[in-house]
Amino acid sequence: MPIRLAALFSLFVSACGFQSAAIPDEPEVSEPELSEVAQPVINTCDPVNYPCDPFDRFANGVCQLICGGDGYCLEYSAVEYAWCARHPDRFMTPTKYCSPDGDPMWPTRCLPGFLP
């Protein structure tokens, strides 16, 4: 099993994007490109990869760190709070569980920007 994991890891590492040589048919650029323009835009605050707990007092700080200074943890909606208050200790969806006290207990996600 460790050999398979090592082979899989080396495959992923070798697949990482390294910049290839320029194609010779491309015309020469007269002005040098600025590094800000030449670099691709990468969304570092990918909501799928960074779940957070709105009840955690450090969640907004973690989201700010992940999103590069302007991020926050998405709060539960009023509909979610109301549903959980009426249906304690039940699932709203297969992944959204309400606590026995009637509070939402599932993680939300980090969003870029500032608190609304």
Image (cartoon, rainbow, N blue to C red):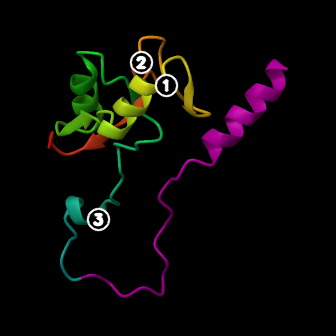
Q: Residue at x 52, y 53 (%)?
A: 17
User: Secondary structure under badge 1?
Assistant: loop
Q: Which residue carries the number 2 mark?
A: 102
Query: Residue at image x 49%, y 67%?
Result: 21
Amino acid at dot 3: Ala
Q: Position of residue 6 (x, y in %)?
A: 74, 27
Asked if the residues shown at circle 1 and circle 2 are in contact, with their CB atoms under 8 angstroms apart, the answer is yes
* Residue that label 1 marks: 87
> Which residues are the magenta region?
1-29
Residue 104 x, y percent position in the rendering: 41, 24
- Considering the numbered disc 3 on the image, is that residue within a helix, a strand or a loop? helix
Q: Is residue 12 magenta?
A: yes
Number of residues whose C-alpha sits closer than 10 Å to that of mark 3, classed few (under 14), some (14–19) or many (20 or more): few
The amino acid beneath tag 2 is Gly
Q: Quadrant of residue 81?
A: top left
Q: Amino acid at mark 1?
A: His
* Residue lying farthest to the front in this orientation: 86
In this view of the protein, which residue sits in the foreground, 19 or 40?
40
Instruction: Count neighbours of disc 2 (C-alpha within 10 A) and say few if under 14, some if 14 to 19, many if 20 or more.
Output: some
Residue 38 numbered mark, or none? 3
